[in-house]
C-alpha cells in the first residue's frame, strides 16, 4: 500500500505491520526446517532483539565516532578466532551475512592474485555443491568459475579432481573454495587435502563454514569425528561463519576470518580523493546499522561457550533421530551421511522400484504443517529434500518422525512429479536471453504461478519443482527472476 495521507499512531502502524505476518511461516517452534535457527530460548532471543533496537541508530561506518562498534566487532571476531583455529596474526571482519562474507572472501582472493602478478581473467575453483553466493561473487567481481564434481556416494569433492582443475587452469586461479559443510547435503569437503594442494600451487583456500562454524567445533568436543576445516589447517586463508545461523542472533550478521591482516587488506576500500570526509569501508557497506552486530554480541554473551555446546548437542541429537528414522523407511535414504545438522533425503530406488519422490514428500509434509525444502536434481545428483535441524527440533522430533512416516507411506507407489508436457513444449523453443518481462509473466501465468492475488506457489508444488528441474539452466534462471519480479511489484495508489 502507499503511505497514508495522515499518519497513524505508532501503535496502530505496528499493529498493521504485524498483521502482514498472517501468512508467514513460523520462525520459532521447529516446524520450518530451513531459513530459521531457533535455540528454543525465548529470553536469549528477546535480549538479542532488544539489542537490535537499542543499537539500530548507531552507525557502524565510523568506529572513531561510535567506539562501541570497534569493541563489539573485536569481541565477535576474537570469539570466532578462538573457536576456529585463529593464530596470533589472524584477524577478521563482521559482515551483514554469509553472502557478503563470501563476496569479500572472493575479493580477497582476487586482490591477492593481482598482487602475485595475475593477468587476464582470474578463475574461482569450487565444487558444484558450493553455495551460490560464490557464483554471485564471481559474477560481480569478474571471475570465471571452474566447477569440480563431487563423489556421488559421499557428496564430497575429491581432492584429486581439484588438483586436476588447478593444473589445467594454471596461474589463472585466484581462489579455491570448499564447504564446511555444504548446504545441500551437510557434508564437509576434504578441506585439509584441498588446502594443501592449493597451497603447493600458491593459491589461497577459503573454507565456507557459514552454516557449520558454530556447530562443528562443539560436535568435535563431544567426541564426534569431524574433519579438519578451520583456520588451523595450513593453506586455509579465510573462513566464513554466520552468527545469524547457529549463533542464534537476529539476521543479519556473519564473520569473515582471515589468516593475516595482509590478506584481509584486499577487502578494504578507502577513498580520500574528494572534498568530503575520507571514506574507509571494511565491508561492502558504508553506512550500516550496528544493531545486528550488537544483537549478536548480546546473544553470544547470554549463551556462552557452554550454551553453544548444549545447543549443538540438542540439534545433533535431533539430527541423529531423523537420520535413523529415514533409514528405516522404505523408499527413502539419507544422502551423505551428514557431518553436521543438515540432512538431505533422497529416494531409495527409482520410481519403478518404489522410491519415494522427495518433491511429493515435501508437499505431504507441508500439508501436515512442516516445511522441508525441495532441492532439484543436478547433473548426476538426485532430487532431494533438505532439513536444517535446530536445537528446538529435539522438542518436536518425535512428532516430525511420525508425520514423516505417514507422508512416506502416502507417497509409496505414487507417481513421481513430472513436468507438464504442455509447459515443456511451450518452453522448448524459448531463448532465455530474448524473453521480456511480459512474455515471462505470461509463461508463469500459464504454469499457474500467477493469479488474481499475484505471484505465489500453489499448496502442492511438486509439479512446479519438477518443471524447474526439467528446464535448461538459463531458462530456469530467467523464469525464477521473473517470478520474483512479480512478487516484488510495487503497490501504488490511495491508502486502502
Image (cartoon, grey):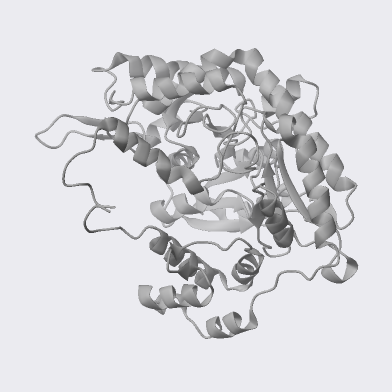
Q: Is residue 111 visible?
A: no
Residue 140 is situated, as x and y percent measured from the top left of the image, at 40, 53
Residue 33 is situated, as x and y percent measured from the top left of the image, at 65, 42
Comparing 305 with 445, the one in front is 445
Residue at screen point 56% across, 54% down:
170
157 above or below 60? below
On the rendered image, what quadrant is the C terminus found in?
bottom left
Q: Is residue 127 visible?
A: yes
Residue at screen point 36% across, 36% down:
15
Quarter location, residue 312? top right
449 above or below 52? below
Residue at screen point 23% across, 37% down:
8
Q: Residue furthest left?
A: 275
Quarter location, residue 408? bottom right
From the viewer's perspective, tell me whether residue 246 is left or right of residue 17.
right
Comparing 154 with 414, the one in front is 414
Residue 218 is situated, as x and y percent measured from the top left of the image, at 70, 22
The image shows a total of numbered marks equal to 0
Residue at screen point 73% across, 24% down:
313
34 above or below 297? below
From the viewer's perspective, tell me whether residue 85 is left or right of residue 477.
right
Residue 125 is situated, as x and y percent measured from the top left of the image, at 57, 51
Amino acid at each position: 500500500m502507499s503511505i497514508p495521507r495522515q499518519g497513524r499512531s505508532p501503535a496502530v502502524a505496528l499493529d498493521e505491520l504485524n498483521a502482514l505476518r498472517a501468512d508467514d511461516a513460523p520462525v520459532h517452534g521447529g516446524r520450518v526446517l530451513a531459513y530459521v535457527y531457533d535455540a528454543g530460548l525465548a529470553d536469549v532471543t528477546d535480549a538479542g532483539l532488544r539489542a537490535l533496537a537499542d543499537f539500530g541508530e548507531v552507525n557502524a561506518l565510523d568506529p572513531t565516532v561510535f567506539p562501541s562498534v570497534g569493541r563489539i566487532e573485536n569481541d565477535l571476531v576474537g570469539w570466532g578466532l578462538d573457536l576456529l583455529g585463529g593464530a596470533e596474526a589472524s584477524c577478521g571482519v563482521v559482515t551483514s551475512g554469509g553472502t557478503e562474507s563470501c563476496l569479500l572472501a572472493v575479493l580477497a582472493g582476487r586482490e591477492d592474485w593481482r598482487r602475485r602478478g595475475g593477468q587476464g581473467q582470474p578463475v574461482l575453483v569450487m565444487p558444484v555443491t558450493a553455495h551460490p553466493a560464490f557464483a554471485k561473487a564471481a559474477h560481480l567481481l569478474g571471475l570465471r568459475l571452474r566447477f569440480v564434481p563431487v563423489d556421488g556416494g559421499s557428496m564430497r569433492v575429491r581432492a584429486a579432481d581439484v588438483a586436476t582443475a588447478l593444473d589445467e587452469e594454471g596461474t589463472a586461479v585466484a581462489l579455491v573454495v570448499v564447504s564446511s559443510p555444504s548446504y545441500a547435503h551437510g557434508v564437509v569437503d576434504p578441506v585439509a587435502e584441498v588446502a594443501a594442494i592449493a597451497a603447493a600451487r600458491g593459491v589461497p583456500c577459503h573454507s565456507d563454514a557459514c552454516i557449520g562454524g558454530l556447530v562443528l567445533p562443539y560436535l568435535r568436543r563431544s567426541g564426534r569425528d569431524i574433519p579438519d576445516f578451520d583456520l588451523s589447517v595450513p593453506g586455509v586463508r579465510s573462513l566464513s561463519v554466520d552468527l545469524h545461523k547457529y549463533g542464534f542472533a537476529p539476521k543479519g550478521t556473519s564473520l569473515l576470518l582471515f589468516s593475516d591482516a595482509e590478506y584481509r587488506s584486499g577487502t578494504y576500500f578507502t577513498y580520500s580523493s574528494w572534498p568530503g570526509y575520507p571514506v574507509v569501508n571494511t565491508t561492502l557497506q558504508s553506512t550500516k546499522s550496528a544493531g545486528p552486530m550488537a544483537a549478536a554480541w548480546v546473544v553470544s554473551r547470554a549463551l556462552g561457550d557452554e550454551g553453544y555446546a548444549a545447543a549443538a548437542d540438542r540439534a545433533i541429537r535431533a539430527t541423529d533421530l531423523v537420520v535413523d528414522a529415514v533409514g528405516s523407511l522404505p523408499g527413502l535414504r539419507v544422502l551423505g551421511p551428514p557431518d553436521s545438522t543438515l540432512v538431505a533425503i533422497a529416494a531409495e530406488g527409482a520410481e519403478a522400484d518404489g522410491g519415494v519422490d522427495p518433491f511429493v514428500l515435501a508437499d505431504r509434509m507441508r500439508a501436515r504443517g512442516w516445511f522441508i525444502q525441495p532441492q532439484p536434481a543436478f547433473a548426476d545428483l538426485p532430487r532431494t529434500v533438505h532439513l536444517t535441524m535446530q536445537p528446538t527440533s529435539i522438542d518436536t522430533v518425535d512428532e516430525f518422525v511420525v508425520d514423516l512416516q505417514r507422508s512416506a507411506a502416502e507417497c509409496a507407489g505414487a507417481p513421481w512429479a513430472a513436468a507438464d508436457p504442455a509447459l515443456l513444449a511451450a518452453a522448448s523453443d524459448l531463448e532465455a536471453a530474448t524473453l521480456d518481462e511480459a512474455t515471462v509473466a505470461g509463461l508463469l501465468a500459464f504454469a499457474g504461478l500467477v493469479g488474481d492475488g499475484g505471484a505465489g506457489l500453489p499448496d502442492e508444488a511438486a509439479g512446479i519443482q519438477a518443471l524447474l528441474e526439467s528446464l535448461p539452466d538459463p531458462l530456469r534462471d530467467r523464469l525464477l527472476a521473473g517470478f520474483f519480479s512479480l512478487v516484488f511489484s510495487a503497490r501504488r495508489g490511495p491508502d486502502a
